[in-house]
Amino acid sequence: MENTPASPVSSYVAVGDSFTEGMCDDLLPDGQFRGWADRVAAALAAERPGREFRYANLAVRGKLIGQICEEQVGTAATMGTDLVTLAGGLNDVLRPGCDVDDVEERLGKAAAALIAEGRTVVMFTSTDPTRRLPGSTRLLPAILRMKAFVESIARDNPGRVVVVDLYTAPCFDDRRMWAEDRLHLSPEGHRRVAAAVLEALGRPAAEDWRAPLPTAAPRGRGEKLRDDLRWLRLHLGPWIGRRLRGRSSGDGRPAKRPELLPYEG
């Protein structure tokens, strides 16, 4: 996909779930995760030496698309920002019986609200989990539908919506791009997504974010088994437990940066 021309950005609001909150990236001094959105904000702020750059991140881990629409989109739409990133729906898709029609309807309405008043909106296609996670094949039809839907929004709004295509980037098949929980990006994964967003916004690419990582030493069967057992105990089990109790990791958690304030990172 061709880049959009690089336009000056004086403010940026990030909307979404744990992907945008930045889970499993390096920790900031205040104990929060950094994340790709903070990395994008830092790069955009650096383009404005001596001038104010404002940034808000409304994302909260665990949020479904309905919650993102109800709790974040309206707020973001009133902030008067130049740029919004919008990512959501994957938490819905992960749940059995997901109503993809409903997810698409809500995501489409969110995009329409954020496109208003001349904002640039960045959206995303999901990575392909089947290339790295056994047992994830059931998710693929919904992920492909969401991919086509996001791309259709961009086609219908040329110059207003740009898409970061993570689905076709084979680098995300590498386990080192993911945290131990296998659902959230590692610091390297967040760094690559930040580079992808900046490229989509027309910034010169300092590197090819799609490039594969250097070849890693092969893991033995015993190491793989230990990793799998640890993952089941520390991550999959608690995730299933929260689903059974109707709980979310983001319940009661405030937004990371709820106000559009000067960014000095």
Image (cartoon, grey):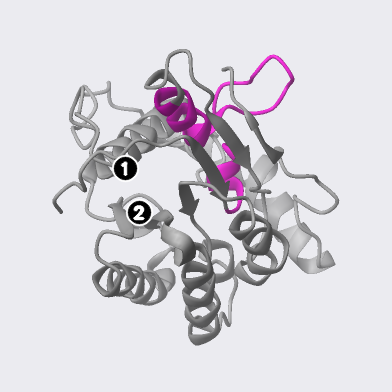
Q: Nearer the viewer, residue 95 or 15?
A: 15
**Kind of residue at disc 1:** Phe
Q: Looking at the image, which residue sits at the far left?
A: 2
Confirm whether residue 23 shows in the render.
no
Q: Judge whether residue 21 is colored magenta.
A: yes
Q: Name the residue under label 2.
A: 127
Where residue 229 sits: x, y (%)? 59, 41
Front residue of 250/96: it is: 250
10 Å neighbourhood of mark 2: few (<14), some, or many (≥20)? some
Left or right: 115, with 254 as reference point: left
Residue 235, image x, y percentages: 65, 45
**Quarter the C terminus occupies:** top right
Q: What stretch is highlighted in magenta?
A: 16-44
Q: Considering only vertical position in the picture, is 177 above or below 132?
A: above
Query: Which residue in the protein does label 1 denote?
Result: 172
- Going from the N terminus, do you reach mark 1 or mark 2 first? 2
Q: Are marks 1 and 2 in contact (CB under 8 Å)?
A: yes
Mark 2 residue type: Thr
